[in-house]
Amino acid sequence: MTLRWRRLGLVLLRALILFALSAVLVGGFWFHAEFYKLGLPILIITGAVTVTMMVLAFRFAITGEYRSFSRPKGFLEFELDELDRVRHGLKKSTLRKPQEKREIRPGNVVSARLIGNDDTEVLKLRIAGIDRKYLADFDKGDLRALGIGSKGELSEMWGKLGGRLDERVCGELIFFERLGRERRK
């Protein structure tokens, strides 16, 4: 499935969720009279829970963002210039050597941090996908997602990971999207 169809499907899903939430709210006015018979404390508790859930659901349906209360599962380390490109949306993927035991999976939320820095999280990223392919098969779209413009820069990037670029080398292209605001300390 292409990215365009996924986005269209997500937009349609959000529209359906908004419609269902609106129907629940309108139906809630009718059911509201029934809650008066149960007493004020139950009305307040049920109303507060319902309104909170509806606000969170509307927020997700409109923005597509949700609040994850879990800790990030893993991290990606970047050099300072790479992290700056991630911050400004110029870099939407990173290149790593293939892992035998995968720690980062699509859908996971991970921390982005500087190489050599302590465990200070700079950004949160959601892993959108992982694509394993030969480095010789990288096209201009892959290079653009990495935030680079040529195969020479790809060779330099792979060299920093401790490898030599040839046609038989396979790498993992990890696609991510930035979540929320940047943490400042």
Image: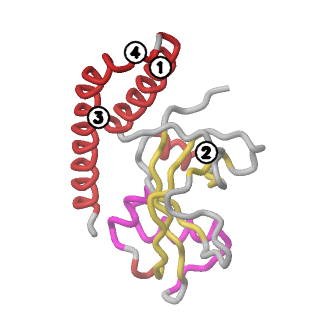
The stretch of residues the image draws in magenta is 139-166
* CA–CA distance in space, label 4 to label 3: 25 Å
Q: Residue at x 54, y 76 (%)?
A: 171
Rendered view: 38 above or below 138: above
Horizontal relation, residue 83 to residue 161: left or right: left
Structural crowding at the residue carrying mark 2, measured as other residues with C-alpha within 10 Å and reported as few (<14), some (14–19) or many (≥20): few
Q: Earlier in the sequence, mark 4 or mark 3?
A: 3
* CA–CA distance in space, label 2 to label 1: 45 Å
Query: What percent of the width, then of the height, locates residue 83?
Result: 56, 45
Query: What percent of the width, then of the height, locates residue 31?
Result: 30, 24
Rendered view: 90 above or below 160: above
Residue 149 located within the stretch drawn in magenta:
yes
Question: Dot 3 lies on which element?
Answer: helix
Q: Earlier in the sequence, mark 3 or mark 2?
A: 3
Structural crowding at the residue carrying mark 4, measured as other residues with C-alpha within 10 Å and reported as few (<14), some (14–19) or many (≥20): few
Q: Earlier in the sequence, mark 4 or mark 1?
A: 4
* CA–CA distance in space, label 4 to label 1: 17 Å
Residue indicated by mark 3: 21
Residue indicated by mark 1: 48
Quadrant showing the C terminus: top right
Decide whether the magenta segment is chiefly helix, strand or loop. Answer: helix
Task: Check the image and name the residue furthest to the right.
Answer: 118
Residue indicated by mark 2: 80
Q: Residue at x 65, y 54 (%)?
A: 73
The label shown at residue 37 is 4
Rendered view: 59 above or below 85: above
Task: Check the image and name the residue furthest to the front.
Answer: 37
Question: Dot 1 lies on which element?
Answer: helix
